[in-house]
Image (cartoon, rainbow, N blue to C red):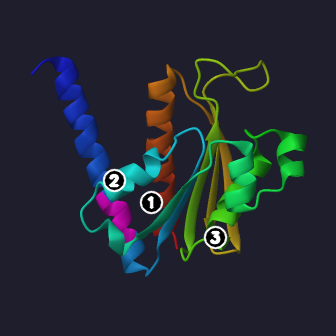
Amino acid sequence: MGSLGLERLVEVQALDTLLTQLGLALTARGLKLVTAESCTGGLIAGACTSIAGSSDWFERGHVTYSNEAKTEQLGVPAEVIERHGAVSREVAMAMALGALQHSRAQVAVAVTGIAGPGGGTPAKPIGTVWFGFAIGQDFVQTEVMLFPGDRGQVRAATVKHALVRLLSLVSQR
């Protein structure tokens, strides 16, 4: 196995460990997770459901790639998208809260970003990703990250960051 193959194997094992820990943390607290994804196109949900037993803690995933989908599926006001842009703190927050409202989960993660290779601007360059995290209606947190690399690397970094933050937030509850 070449070094790239070994690197990928280590990365997959680390992700599986992270997902197992997240599942245990959610299950121990009687919580379920919902995802609302734009730039990752369902990769977070796919990672979660790759773990055996994830039906105990993963409730559903929303892939809301278009602005219309964000409005129709999650209830993100079109005016918020028009005013702030789809890649913004306000939209990430609305996506996370909307995912909770349109599911039976208690924990939500939302991601909206610019994975590239096009679409970036000086204000929002390629690699810009906004995250929204919600635990119930009383806890909402957003953050922005700027990930380097090509489209695949930005999306992979987004998935990993979302899962690491989820584990941290759920473990603190």
Say what amino acid the circle numbered 1 marks: Leu
Q: What x and y, as percent, mark residue 29?
A: 43, 80
Mark identifier at residue 18 = 2
CB within 8 Å, label 2 to label 1: yes
Q: Name the mark on residue 57.
A: none
**Residue 52, located in which quarter of the rendered image?**
bottom left
Q: Residue at x 43, y 43 (%)?
A: 160
Horizontal arrangement in the rendering, residue 36 relative to residue 168 (left or right): right
Considering the whole magenta stretch, tell me its main secondary structure. Answer: helix
Mark on residue 167?
A: 1
Q: Is 49 placed left or right of 161 in the picture?
A: left
Between tags 3 and 2, which lies in front?
Answer: 3
Q: Nearer the viewer, residue 130 or 116?
A: 116
What separation in Å lies between label 3 and label 2 (alpha carbons)?
26 Å
Q: Earlier in the sequence, mark 2 or mark 1?
A: 2
* Residue underneath mark 3: 102
Q: Residue at x 34, y 74 (%)?
A: 56
What is the quadrant of the N terminus in the image? top left
Give how far across and how far down residue 22 sits, in percent: 38, 62
Magenta stretch: includes residue 22: yes
Q: Which residues make up the magenta segment?
A: 20-25
Decide: is 166 above or below 127. below
Give, as a three-letter code, the residue at label 2: Leu
**Category of crowding for the residue at label 3, using alpha-carbon neighbours closer than 10 angstroms: few (below 14), some (14–19), many (at least 20):** some
Q: Find numbered disc 2 in the image and state the secondary structure of the residue it sits on.
A: helix
x and y percent of residue 2 in the render? Answer: 13, 17
Q: Residues within 10 Å of mark 1 (few under 14, many from 20)?
A: many
The amino acid type found where label 3 is placed reads His
